[in-house]
Amino acid sequence: MNKGPIGIFDSGIGGTSIWREINKVLPYESTIYLADSRNAPYGEKSKEQILQLSIKNVEFLLQKGCKLIVVACNTATTNAIKELRASYSVPLIGIEPAIKPAALNSKTKTVGVLATKGTLSSALFNNTSEMHASGIKVLDQVGTGLVEQIEKGEINTSKTKELLRNYLDPMLSQGMDQLVLGCTHYPYLLPLIKEILPENIKIIDSGEGVARHTKNVLQLNDLLSGSDGESSSHQFFTNGDVEVLKFFLRDVSVPYSAQFLNF
Ligand code: DGL
């Protein structure tokens, strides 16, 4: 047993979509969430820049005593998790676009992946696609501008909707029947995405799977906090706008603290 917190980081507030899944599956675990919003979007940065930012985030979470770290960012995972695992002994959980279930489910043999430039150009993503989607047409689409809109809290605006239409319509006309959300910010766009896509298009994201995997890894390493009724605590740190972070957490029912931190 280990009562230490789970550390979670993202380039911004997107990874709170993963925090939600983790809190659902592991309600007795304490968490520390780090939003590096000042440096968002990671998706437009080089692999080396993404690695350096990821190291800074991991160091912060380790200093806070985290027993396991979830890289709640597809871009950081696909560009840096190998190097992070080679440098740190703490268990590191990553997130990648869920291409495998999408390929297995697809009847039209055509799958759309909406993700950042950094994710779609990474070796890890391309290897995974080759391995799990042979015989499947994978339509890669960079979601340019979407992370910025979400970081500003501009979810339900005509600009965000127009960007989404520009990305989704061409994939629809090419026969996509599965859409993979390959960025942890995008689940916050689900209401808009559902307005645009016909009902028969399946939307897949990796959040729930990451939470289940996190539980398994804690179990295997004897790191679960135990469920003896002691309350868990949740701390959120951002180097961006704390009000935007709180806006995204407005429906969270467990007690938490959210603060600005100049890191
Ligand atoms: N949430 C990050 C991801 O999953 C966004 C990346 C970015 O900052 O561009 O890819």
Image (spheres, rainbow, N blue to C red):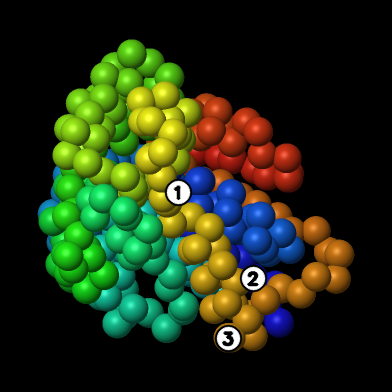
Does 59 sit above or below residue 45? below
Numbered disc 2: secondary structure: loop
Q: x%, y% of residue 55?
A: 31, 65
Does 156 sit above or below residue 246? above
Tell me what residue is drawn at x 17 percent, y 55 percent: 137
Q: Cβ(mark 1) to ligand 1 < 8 Å? A: yes
Does 111 sit above or below residue 104? above
Earlier residue among tags 3 and 2:
2
Residue under pointer 3? 221
In the picture, measured across the screen, residue 171 lies left or right of residue 149, that is: left
Numbered disc 1: secondary structure: loop
Tell me what residue is drawn at x 19 percent, y 33 percent: 173
Earlier residue among tags 2 and 1:
2
| Numbered badge on residue 4 | 2
Q: x%, y% of residue 101?
A: 38, 62
Spatial CA distance of label 2 from label 1 is 20 Å
Q: Place residue 146 in its image quadrant.
A: top left
Residue type highlighted by circle 3: Asn
Residue type highlighted by circle 2: Gly
Q: Nearer the viewer, residue 169 or 153?
A: 169
Residue 241 can be seen in this image: no
Q: Nearer the viewer, residue 39 or 107?
A: 107
Spatial CA distance of label 3 from label 2 is 13 Å
Residue under pointer 1? 15
Q: x%, y% of residue 197?
A: 36, 31
Residue 107 can be seen in this image: yes
- The residue carrying pointer 1 sits among few (fewer than 14), some (14 to 19) or many (20 or more) residues within 10 Å by Cα, namely many
User: Does the residue at mark 1 contact the one at mark 3 (Cβ under 8 Å)?
Assistant: no
- The residue carrying pointer 2 sits among few (fewer than 14), some (14 to 19) or many (20 or more) residues within 10 Å by Cα, namely some
Q: Place residue 168 in its image quadrant.
A: top left
